[in-house]
């Protein structure tokens, strides 16, 4: 079975690229190989790893769930800065977009400073960003402090946290992945209560200041994430062996080395070549980018929609908490269920059905803004959201070979950050023109449902086309081309570091490297 999300995030942050270079430079400087092996095999699957797992859960609760709770202060921000719905919605949208788009920068920091230092730096950045936000005097300043600075701090905290978790757990990695995924749900179930209490006692400025202090707990969580192996020395052969030459030839060689480093970085973290050669990955990435246009918008506008129709703010915050509790209790068994052999090769269809139900559930809000109706909506949305969150990275692992997974995930994060950025402001503009929140939920319902149909129909056509191509090749006596059939057969069986003895793996690499 293919590893789940943390093992994938482990690759996104750049550690695997470090492994490959270490294998090629076994004779280079650094600790003995037996010391490294001892460091990477003694600690996993127990011991201090349980402390790291708990710290990862807390980091995900403080970072990934935080943007959805900004809706509690939505009306206050509007009144304070005399801003429209569109202008106010840029705050959580910028925060969420930077959280996803900062992956490549986070990878570089992890490679140079390690996971622990990066998590702690992200905690400081997010805490300072929220604290400074309490002193802002314009909505533009809030974009920079709460949006860019805090969002970047979230990115630098959660990605290294799930990365180092993948090193601490090998045999029990599926269990660790399932437990860590409940961190987001834990944040959704607790942060609304905390935000509502602080809002009633201190107002939005005092709440932002206290929440900034709460986010500093990411530094405490990062402090316990001690590395399992020493970092690779950053000395390069080029600087040791090649003297600096001020002539034109030396300058030309320096430019060539910089260009080669840039190409290597883009290949390691951004799969542009894979997007052009792998049709399945292209379809999936376009579908997910389309989905994100309306997937998180309802979470931002749920509280303003409920309070605008007379519901008490504490009850509206309770709806978000219920959504979090549903994810806490549903995600672990869902992850175990869809790991059964029967679902192998069918993950994309289960994912598409759950996404379609999630899209249709947004139309429930159009019926009424009463608590019973919105409770039914939250339960339906939470169940489908649990399935989507459990299968999203699994489907991506089935779509690309594991050796290219980190770069594929990096490109996907950049693509979806674009629609995550523009989705809430577009919804706010719709509210400003119509004066009704129901049009926002209706638009999100149509957008998400259409993206689900796009994924379902496209992958069904690709599967049928692959089967017909395979039958034709068998009938003609020639071997089947691996470009279409290999992704559904071979990707989940390839180990993380690449199995060079597996012939189908080498065939797939030749296809995607064109």
Image (tube, rainbow, N blue to C red):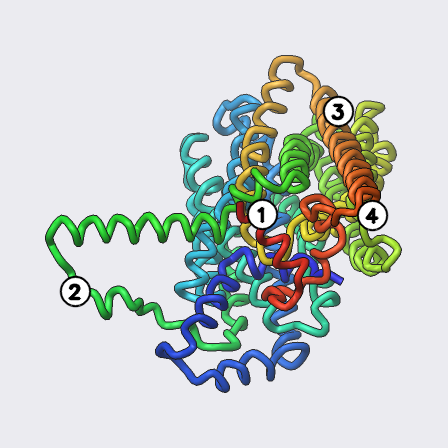
Task: Tell which residue pokes out farthest to the front in this image.
Answer: 477
Observer-nearest of 170 and 22:
22
Label 3 environment density (alpha carbons within 10 Å; few <14, some 14–19, many ≥20): some
Q: CA distance from mark 1 to mark 4?
A: 23 Å
Name the residue tied to disc 2. Answer: 243
Label 3 vs label 4, nearer the camera: 4
Label 2 environment density (alpha carbons within 10 Å; few <14, some 14–19, many ≥20): few
Q: Secondary structure at mark 2?
A: loop
The answer to whether one can see residue 18 in this image is yes
Observer-nearest of 31 and 145:
31
Verify CB contact (< 8 Å) between mark 1 and mark 2: no
Q: CA distance from mark 1 to mark 3?
A: 34 Å
Q: Secondary structure at mark 1?
A: helix
Label 3 vs label 2, nearer the camera: 2
Of mark 1 and mark 3, the one earlier in the sequence is 3
Q: Which mark is residue 446?
A: 3
Q: Measuring from the top left, give residue 319's x and y in whole percent.
A: 77, 41
Name the residue tied to disc 4. Answer: 346
Label 1 vs label 2, nearer the camera: 1
Q: Which mark is residue 512?
A: 1
Residue at (49, 68) in percent of width and height: 19
**Quarter of the rendering containing residue 10:** bottom right
Verify CB contact (< 8 Å) between mark 1 and mark 4: no
Q: Quadrant of the N terminus?
A: bottom right
Q: CA distance from mark 4 to mark 2?
A: 57 Å
Q: Secondary structure at mark 4?
A: loop
């Amino acid at each position: 079975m293919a590893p789940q999300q943390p093992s994938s995030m482990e690759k996104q942050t750049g550690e695997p690229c470090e492994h490959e270079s270490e294998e090629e430079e076994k004779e280079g400087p650094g600790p003995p190989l037996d010391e490294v092996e001892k460091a990477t095999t003694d600690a996993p699957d127990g011991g201090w790893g349980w402390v790291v797992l708990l710290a990862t859960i807390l980091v995900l609760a403080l970072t990934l769930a935080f943007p959805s709770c900004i809706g509690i202060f939505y009306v206050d921000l509007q009144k304070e800065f005399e801003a429209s719905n569109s202008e106010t919605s840029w705050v959580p949208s910028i925060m969420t977009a930077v959280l996803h788009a900062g992956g490549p920068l986070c990878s570089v920091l992890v490679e140079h400073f390690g996971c622990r230092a990066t998590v702690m730096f992200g905690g400081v950045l997010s805490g300072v960003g929220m604290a400074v936000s309490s002193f802002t005097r314009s909505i533009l300043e809030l974009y920079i402090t709460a949006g860019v600075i805090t969002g970047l701090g979230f990115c630098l905290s959660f990605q290294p946290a799930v990365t180092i978790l993948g090193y601490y757990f090998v045999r029990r990695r599926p269990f660790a992945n399932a437990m860590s995924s409940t961190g987001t749900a834990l944040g959704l179930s607790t942060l609304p209560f905390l935000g509502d209490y602080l809002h009633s006692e201190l107002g939005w400025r005092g709440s932002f200041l206290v929440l900034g202090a709460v986010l500093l707990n990411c530094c405490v969580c990062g402090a316990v994430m001690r590395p399992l192996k020493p970092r690779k020395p950053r000395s390069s052969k080029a600087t040791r062996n090649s003297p600096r030459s001020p002539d034109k030839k030396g300058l030309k060689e320096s430019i060539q080395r910089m260009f080669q480093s840039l190409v290597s970085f883009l290949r390691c973290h951004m799969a542009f070549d894979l997007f052009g050669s792998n049709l399945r990955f292209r379809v999936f990435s376009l579908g997910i980018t389309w989905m994100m246009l309306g997937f998180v918008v309802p979470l931002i506008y749920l509280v303003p929609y409920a309070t605008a129709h007379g519901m008490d703010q504490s009850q509206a915050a309770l709806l978000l908490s219920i959504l979090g509790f549903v994810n806490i209790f549903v995600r672990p068994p869902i992850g175990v269920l869809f790991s059964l052999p029967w679902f192998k090769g069918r993950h994309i269809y289960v994912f598409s059905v759950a996404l379609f139900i999630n899209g249709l559930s947004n139309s429930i809000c159009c019926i009424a803004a009463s608590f019973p109706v919105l409770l039914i909506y939250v339960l339906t949305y939470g169940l489908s959201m649990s399935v989507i969150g459990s299968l999203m990275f699994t489907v991506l692992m089935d779509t690309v070979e594991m050796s290219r997974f980190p770069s594929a995930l990096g490109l996907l994060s950049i693509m979806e950050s674009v629609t995550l950025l523009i989705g809430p402001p577009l919804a706010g503009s719709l509210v400003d023109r119509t004066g009704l929140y129901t049009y926002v939920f209706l638009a999100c319902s149509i957008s998400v449902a259409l993206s689900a149909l796009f994924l379902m129909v496209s992958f069904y056509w690709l599967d049928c086309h692959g089967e017909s191509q395979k039958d034709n090749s068998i009938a003609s006596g020639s071997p089947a081309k691996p470009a279409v059939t290999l992704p559904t057969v071979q990707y989940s069986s390839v180990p993380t570091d690449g199995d060079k003895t597996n012939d189908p793996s080498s065939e797939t690499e030749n296809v995607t490297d064109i």
